[in-house]
Image (cartoon, grey):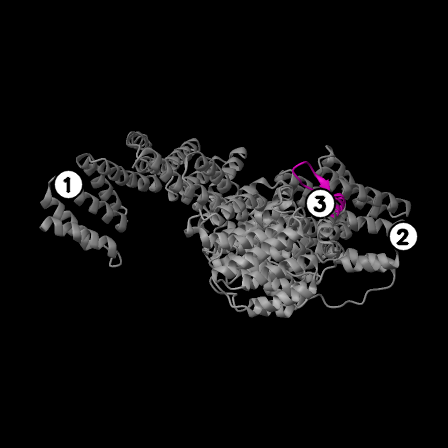
Amino acid sequence: MTAPAAEEQELWDRLWETEKLPRGRAQIAALEAALREADAVGSPSLRYAARMFITSAYQQGGEPAKAFVPFAWCLAVHDRGEADPAWNHNLHWYFKHMVGSMTTFPEVPLERTRAVLDDMERRYRAAGYTMNPVHQYRAVLARHVGDRETAAEEYRLWSAAPRGEMSDCVGCEPSDKVAHLSWLGRYAEAVEAAEPVLGGTFSCVEQPQLILTELLLPYVHIGRYEEAAAAHRQAYRGIRHDPAQLQEVATHVAFCALTGNHARGLDLVERHLGWLETAPTPYAEQEFAAAAALTLRLVAEAGHGDAPVRRAEGATTVAALRDELAERASAVAARFDARNGTAEQGDRVRATLAAEPLVDHLPLTGTTAPAPAPAPAVSLPDSPAELADLAEREERLGRSAADIWARFDELCPEPSGALLAQRLSATADVEAHTDLEAASRGFERAAELFAEAGDAVAAESRRGAAILTAALAGARPDAAAELEASAERLAAIGEAADHGRALLRLAFFHFTQQDFDAALAVLDRAEGPASASPELTGTWLERRALVRANQGDLPVAIELAAEAAARFAEAGSPERAASVRLLGARCRAGLGELEAAFAETSTIDPGTDLATRARLHQLRGHLATDLDRVEDAATAFRAAVGDFAATGAPLDAAATRIDLALAYLNLDRPDEAAEAVEDAEAVLERAGAEHELARGRYLLAKAYRALGRPEQAVELFDVVIGHFTAAGNEPAAAQAAESRAEVLDELDRDAEAAAGFEAAAARFHTAELPGPELRTRRRAALSWLWAGEAGRAEEALAVADAVTGEGPEFAWESAMTSYDGARLLANLGRPAEALPRASAAAEALREMEAEGPAVAAEVLCGRLLRDIGRVAEAREVLTAALARLPVGAVEQRADVEAVLAELTD
C-alpha cells in the first residue's frame, strides 16, 4: 500500500470509528478534524463520505444548523454525477432532516422550505420511493404555521400512503402522528395511534423515549395517569443527558407543571437551564423557555416567588426568571410568526404561559405503601379559645393540629393577648424544625404576651422554650443556668407538670451537648413531677431511653422504650407510642438482633403520623438491606420516599432515594437505580448534603456502568473521587478509584486502567487497608501486561509482592496475587518462574476451600509443567484438576481435556 493510500485508509478507519462515539460535541469534533484532513489529502469519495458522516452528526448531535452546508455540498456533487452511489440512500434520507430543521429556524424563509420539500418529492418519485414521508413532512410544516386545512389533507395522504424504505422508523412515524392528533386535541386517537408499537423492539436511538414523550399529555387528558407517570420516568431517563433533546425535555417540564409536580418541574428547569444558551434550534429554545416559565409561574403562585434558582451566571429568583423566560419565549415566537405570516407560534406560547394544571397532583414515583387511613372526622368547637387549647393537647399527643389551627385562623384571623401567644407558640413549634432563631423569637414574643395577660406560668414556659431554641442555634452560652433558673421559677409558681416539662427541657439541652450524665441527673430529679400524667411520664421515659441508648446501654434503653410506649398508649397517643417503639427497634438492631427488630417494625402502627410512618419504613428498609432481603428493602424505601415527600421533607425523601438506589442495584435494576439518584441530585445539591450526594453519585456511576454507559460512568467516578477526597474519606475515594479503573479495563483502555488501579492502591495504602491495596496492585500489574507494557507489569507485580498484611481478606488477595503473578510470567514466556507462584496459589486456595479458584490454579500448574517439558507431572496434575471441576464448568472442562489430549498424543 502506498503512503497516500495508507493515509487515506487511516482516514476511512477514523470516520467509521466515530460511529462508536456518543453523539454530540465529541463526535462532531472528531468528524470536523477528519473532514479537514480529508479535504487536504483525501480522494473525492472520501471528501463526500466525510460530509455525509458529519451531516448526520450535526443533525443528531444538537447542531442541525451546521448540517445545511455539507448536505448542500453533497447534493451538488450528486447532481453532477460525481457521488458514490453507495451513499444515495443516506442522501435521500437526510432530506427529511433538512426539511424538519428548516422549519425550526425563523431565519429560513418558508418558500425555501417548501422548495426543498418539492425537490424531495421529485427525487423520491424518480427513485421509486413512497410518498409517505413527503406527506408526513408537509403535514409537519402545515402544523407549524397553523394551516389546519392543509395539515388535515396531508395527514390523510400520509396515512393512506404505504410505508417504504424512506419512511421514518416504526417508532418515529407513529410519534409524529401522536403529535399531530394531540395538536388537534384528539387525545384518545393519539394514544390509539401509538399502541401498536408500544412494547415492541425499536432500532432507532430516538425511541422509545420520543413516542413516550409525545404521549405524556394525551395520557393525562384521557385519565391514564399511571401510564403517564411511567412514560415520564422512562422517557426522561433516556434524554436527560442529551442537550440535543432540549425540545423533548421541555415537554417533560410542561408535563410536571400540568400535573401538580411543580417541585419536580423546578428541578428540571434548574438542571437544564444551561442548555438554553446552546439550544439546538430556536424552536427548542422557545419550547423550553415557555415550559420553564409556566413552571416558575406556578411555583411563584404557590408562594415561592422569592425562592432562589441556580444558574451558571449566578442565582436569581423564581419570579425574576419566570419573567425573563416568558419574554424570551414570546420573542422567539414573534420571529416565527413574522416569518410564517400567522399567529400560530405566538398563540402556542401564550397558551403555555397561561396554562393551569390538568390534575391537582399526579404521583410520579414508583409503587408506595398504602396511605394511612384518614383521621376520623372531628367536630371542632367554634370558640377560638377552645380551639387553641385543643390544638395544644393534640400536638402534645404527637398529632397534627393543622386543621384545628386552620379553623382557628378562620374564626380569629387577628388574635390578641393570650390567644395570639398560643398561636405564635404553635408557629414557633413548627419553625423549630427549620429555623431555630425564628422559633426563639416567636417563643419570646409569646412569653411577653402571656405576661401581659397575667399568665405567669405560661409566660415562663414559653421563655424556657425560647432559651432552649436559642441555645440550640448557638446563641445562649449560659443556657444551662438559665434553663435551671426557669425550672426553679416554675416549681414555685406552677403545677408539677409545668415543673416537669421545664426539667425535661433542661435535660434535653444537656443531651444535645452530649453531656449524658448531666442529662440523667436532671431526669432523675424530674421523676416525681413527670408522674403528673401518662403523657408526661411517657415523655420522661422516652428521654431516659434516648440517653441510655446514646450511652451504649441498649438493653436498658429497650426496656425504657417499651414502658414509654405503654404510657403513651394509656394517654391515648398511638402516634407517640409508635415513635418510641421505633427507638426500641433501633436499639434492638444495634444489639445485632436484626430479625427481631425487623419483626417488631411489622407490629408498629403509627396511625395518621406520616413522619413516624416515614421513619418506620426507612428503618425497615435499612434492616431489610442488612438482612439481604433486597425486595423488602426496595418496597420499604419506596414507601419512605413517598411519606417523606407527603410530610414536606424533601431532603429526607432525597436521602432515602439514595438508599432506594442501592436496593435497586442489588436487585439488578440499574435503570431504576439511576432514576432514583437523578431525582435526588438537585435537592441534595441545593441542601449542601455532600455526603449523600457523593454516595448517590457513586451509585449512579455504578448504574451507568450496568446500563452500558461506561464513558459517563468514568466521568462520574472522577467527580465522586473528588467528593470523597474533599471530605477526607480516603477508603471511599479508593473504592471509587478502583471502580473507575474497572470500567476502563472493560473498555480495553488498559494503560489507563493500570494507572487507575495504581491510584486506587495508593489510596488504600494511605487508608491502611492492605487487602484492597494488594488487590488493586495485582490488577494494575495485569493491566500493564494487557497494555503491552511488560516492564511496568513486572514492576507493579514486585510492588504487590512487597505489600504486607494479615487476616482472611489479605490471605485471599495474597493467593490471588500468586495466581495472577503466575499468569503474568507465563504470558511473558517464563513458565519456570511462573510455576512456583501457581503452585503456591493452588495450595493456599485449597486450604481456604475455594474449590473453583483452586482448580483454576491447578490447571495453570499443569500447563506450566507441560511448557517446561515435565509432561508426566502435567498429566497427573491436570487429571486431578479435571476430577475436581464442577459439573457446570463446561468450557473449562473442555479446555483441560484438550490439553490432556495433546499430552496423550
Can the viewer see residue 773 in this picture? yes
- Comparing labels 3 and 1, the label whose residue is closer to the camera: 1
| Callout 1 touching callout 2 (CB < 8 Å) | no
Find residue 771 and report its image quarter. top left
Query: In terms of secondary structure, where does tag 1 sit?
Result: helix
Q: Is residue 650 left or right of residue 69?
A: right
Give the residue at mark 3.
434
Give the residue at mark 2.
414
The residue at the point 52 percent across, 57 percent down is 123
In this view, the residue in front, 581 or 245, is 245
In this view, the residue in front, 736 or 232, is 232
**Residue 168 screen position, x and y as percent:** 52, 60
- Residue extending furthest front? 80
Amino acid type shown at disc 2: Glu
Q: Is residue 599 left or right of residue 850?
A: right
Amino acid type shown at disc 1: Asp
Q: Is residue 702 left or right of residue 813?
A: right
Can the viewer see residue 771 in this picture? no
- Range of magenta residues: 306-328
Location of residue 896 with respect to 161 vertically, above or below: above
